[in-house]
Image (tube, helix red, strand yellow):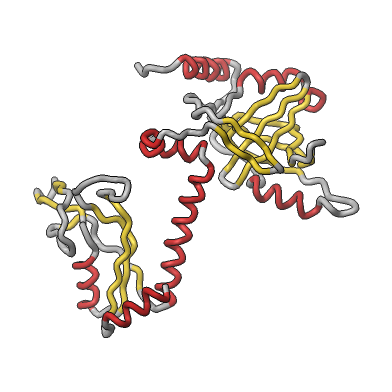
Amino acid sequence: MADYSNLEKVRLEKISKLKEIGIEPYPRRAERTHSIEKATQAYLAVEDKTDPKEIQVILAGRIRSIRPMGKVTFAHIEDGSGRIQLFFRTDDIGEDQLDFFKNYFDLGDYIQASGKIFRTRTGELSVWVAEYLMLAKAITPLPAAKDQVVDGEIISHATLSDPETRYRQRYADLAVNLDVRDIFRTRTRTIRAIQHFMDAKDFLEVETPILQPIYGGAAAQPFTTQHNQLKQELFLRISFELYLKRLLVGGFDKVYEIGRDFRNEGVSFKHNPEFTQMEFYWAYANYLDVMNLTEEM
């Protein structure tokens, strides 16, 4: 049996109670109408008008904070596009529903909430909740973090900081350190920009085998594996070179590949045995052409 912490046991008990009263803690789908970013944009587009249109939304996201205050409760939720505050009030959803939220929802749970967007007295953009639904009950609590809103910007304190934990549990790092997500987005945009550049130069992007019977293209130690059906030893590629060159032999003039290579060597924060690499080959060109292309890129 799994060794659960006390907090995890409490959450598992809540899951059991939810099922007992006929509420599915993991429904099959959400009915959201907007991402948080799109909902915010929709409200800001009409906010300054003389007769602003009421913006009704259904949002979904992970709960990052819960603040009960008598007959009202505030919570922050977050999706992949941003964060927004939820406003629950007894007069709108009823005392039973407010108590249910406070008793069964925890930080890290996923919730669907519907209602109109408005600004609180402090100016924070919020959703005036009319209905809500449990989307997923989190068993393991997120690493502790304290969020502070300063001039409309969310400042996180005491987030996950241990390097060993951050690298080994990347999902937890992404969940609590929002700036890390920007690194992932920047990487994706960088690769896409390189692809667009190479495509504009009439290079053809290709995929070559990862499992290869002969490794080559670099002076490095390979990872080995076994093909059971063929009873053959194979190697995880250490380079794209040999197969890309075969494509030139086959008649292509310009080819490139962006993908994973594997080298069974030392490990450090600068060197990883599995890494992303780009290689390109260009017929009828010399090193000066390659230099100019690289500088232009």
Q: State the image coordinates of residue 188 (x, y, percent, origin top left).
A: 45, 57
* Residue positioned most to the right: 50
Q: Quadrant of residue 14?
A: top right
Report whether 61 appears left or right of 142: right
Q: Quadrant of residue 119?
A: top right
Quarter containing the C terminus: bottom left
Q: Is residue 3 left or right of residue 42?
A: left
* 9 is higher (above) or lower (below) than 117: above
On the image, the x and y values in percent for residue 25 come to 55, 26
What residue is shown at x 82% (from left), y 46% (from top)? 54
Instruction: Answer left or right for 161 relative to 108.
Output: left
Q: Is 236 in front, or is 229?
A: 236
Which percent across, then down, holds residue 70? 76, 19
* Residue 66 versus residue 288 in the image, above or below: above
Above or below, 245 relative to 181:
below
Q: Residue at x 30, y 53 (%)?
A: 275
- Residue extending farthest to the bottom is 284
How far across and down, in percent of the image, does residue 129 sit? 74, 33
Side (left or right) of 218 relative to 176 = left
